Image: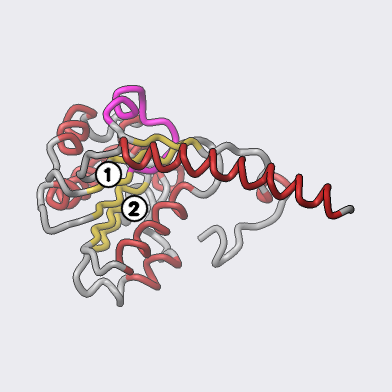
Amino acid sequence: MSDTKTTTKEARHKRAMEKQKAAVDSSIEAADIERGVALLLTGDGKGKSSSAFGMVLRAMGYGMKVGVVQFIKGEQLSGEELYLRDRFDKSDFYQMGTGFTWDTQDRSNDIAAAKRTWVEAERMLSDASYDLVILDELTYMIAFSYLEEKQILDAIKSRPTEQSVVVTGRGGGSALRDIMDTVSEVKDVKHAFTSGIRARRGVDF
C-alpha cells in the first residue's frame, strides 16, 4: 500500500474515532442520575446466571457487599457457590435447595421452599448495606405462581436507592420488564447439549 493510501486510511480512521468519541462523551455527560440500577437477564440462551456472577466478582473487587439468592438451583453445589462461599466474609449466599422443579415434582413443597427463600431475598432488598443483590432464576417463581408477582415487584421498586439488583431467568412477564432499568435477552443460537454433549463442569455448572 502506498504512503498516500495509508495516510488517507489513517485520516478516515481518525475522523471516525473522533466522531465516535464525541458521541460517547455526549452520552456520558447526559447520564447524570446517580443511583442503583435494576437489571433483568432473560432469554432462552445460556449465560444469564454466568453474567450475573460476573457482576458479583466485579462488585466484590470493589469491596462491595453482595447478596446472592438462588431459586430453583441448590440440590447440587455449583462452582459459583464452592468458590464464593468461603470468600463471602461480608456478603451472603442463599439457595432454595430443592433442585429443579422437574426433579422434585412436588408443587406444594416447592412453593413452601420458594416462600422461605423469598424471606431472605426480601431481607436483602430492604437492607441498604447491600450494594448488589442477585436474584438468580427468580423469573420462574413468577411464571409458576410460586410467589406473588406484586410482592416481588414492590420489593424491587422500594429497595434502597443506592442498591442494585440483578434478576435472571427466562420470561418473567411484562410487568417485571417494565420496572427494570436494563433488560438484556440472551439468545439461544446453538447449544452443545442439543448435540448430545453432556453439561461440562466449570462451564455449565
Q: Earlier in the sequence, mark 1 or mark 2?
A: 2
Give the residue type at disc 2: Thr
Q: Which residue is mark 2?
A: 98
Residue in the foreground of this view, choosing between 191 and 158: 158
Question: Given contact means CB atoms under 8 Å apart, are the residues at marks 1 and 2 in contact?
Answer: yes
Give the residue type at disc 1: Asn
170 part of magenta stretch: yes
Q: Which residue is mark 1?
A: 109
Task: Tell me residue 138's x, y (percent).
Answer: 32, 41
For image coordinates 32% across by 46% down, the residue present is 166
Q: Element at badge 2?
A: loop
Disc 1 to disc 2, C-alpha distance: 9 Å
Task: Tell me residue 165's x, y (percent).
Answer: 27, 46
- Residue placed farthest to the right in the image? 1
Looking at the image, residue 97 sits to the left or right of residue 158; the answer is right
Image position of 177 with respect to 45: above or below: above
